[in-house]
Image (cartoon, rainbow, N blue to C red):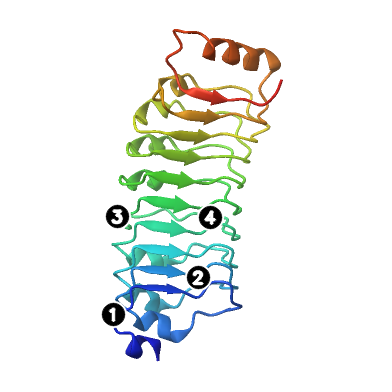
Amino acid sequence: NISENFPLLEELDISLNHFRNLPGFVCHCQTLLKLNLNNNSLGGLPTTFRNLTSLKKICLGDNRLSFFPKELTFLNSLEDLYLNGNKISVFPNFLFGELPSLKRLNLSENQLISLPDSIGFFKELKVLSVGGNLLTSLPPSLKNLVNLEKLILFDNRFESFPEIFDSFEKMKELSLRKNETLTGIPNTIFNLPESCCVNIEECGFSTGLMQNLYRDSMSLDYFVPRFKFSVF
């Protein structure tokens, strides 16, 4: 029994297996800080998972999750949550105070069609990755995430964005790459920090818009974010 033989276990990696159900011993390892469950066949988590209240990092990427496991909402110490590469289509409408310590959230390569307004509750969030989904818009409450440093939105179905980007004074990277339906840039993007890199490769922008952005970015008095362009 791992939990008995290693009563102070802090890190456990059981990735790259074929688990359809979480092995029972895991939920008895209540000193765990990091848990890697990537690349299994998990469709959910047992109710006893909420006992792992010390967890700071959970990797659940590339499993068979079709919903957000509610057991995760009991983990108040959780800082890093990786759910990429699943089949999650709905992100829950969180209650204020759930996952208060969350700093990094990866939901890339799922089937999300929207994000709830409650995403704005995650005030400590530094990295939000929702690339490779089916998103067409962002909730205005996203502007409340004033600590965001990295926002990954590649390969979705955005046509436009709300004017929220002037809230992100700490932003270092914004990826809009491969949003082929995106035809314009919100004005508030130009209020992002000068050090921020904005990737607009493979978007649906007109050649004229791209040329104007490129020309302006080459100007000596250019003090807006750095853009990464496709060849045009």
The three-letter code of the residue at mark 3 reads Ser
Q: Earlier in the sequence, mark 1 or mark 4?
A: 1
x and y, in percent, of residue 212 in the image: 60, 11
C-alpha distance separating marks 3 and 4: 22 Å
- The mark lying in front, picked from 2 and 1, is 1
211 up-or-down from 188: above or below: above
The three-letter code of the residue at mark 4 reads Val
x and y, in percent, of residue 67 in the image: 53, 63
Question: Mark 3 = which residue?
Answer: 101
Q: Are marks 1 and 4 in contact (CB under 8 Å)?
A: no
- Whether residue 49 is visible: yes
Question: Mark 2 = which residue?
Answer: 37
Specify the label residue 8 is tagged with. 1
Number of marks in picture: 4
Left or right relative to 12: residue 62: right
Q: Earlier in the sequence, mark 3 or mark 1?
A: 1
Q: Are marks 2 and 1 in contact (CB under 8 Å)?
A: no
Q: Quadrant of residue 21?
A: bottom right
Q: Measuring 45% from the left and 78% from the top, which residue is drawn there?
A: 46
Q: Earlier in the sequence, mark 2 or mark 4?
A: 2
Q: Are marks 2 and 4 in contact (CB under 8 Å)?
A: no
Quadrant in the picture for the N terminus: bottom left
Q: Residues within 10 Å of mark 2 (few under 14, many from 20)?
A: many
The three-letter code of the residue at mark 1 reads Leu
Q: Quadrant of residue 73?
A: bottom left
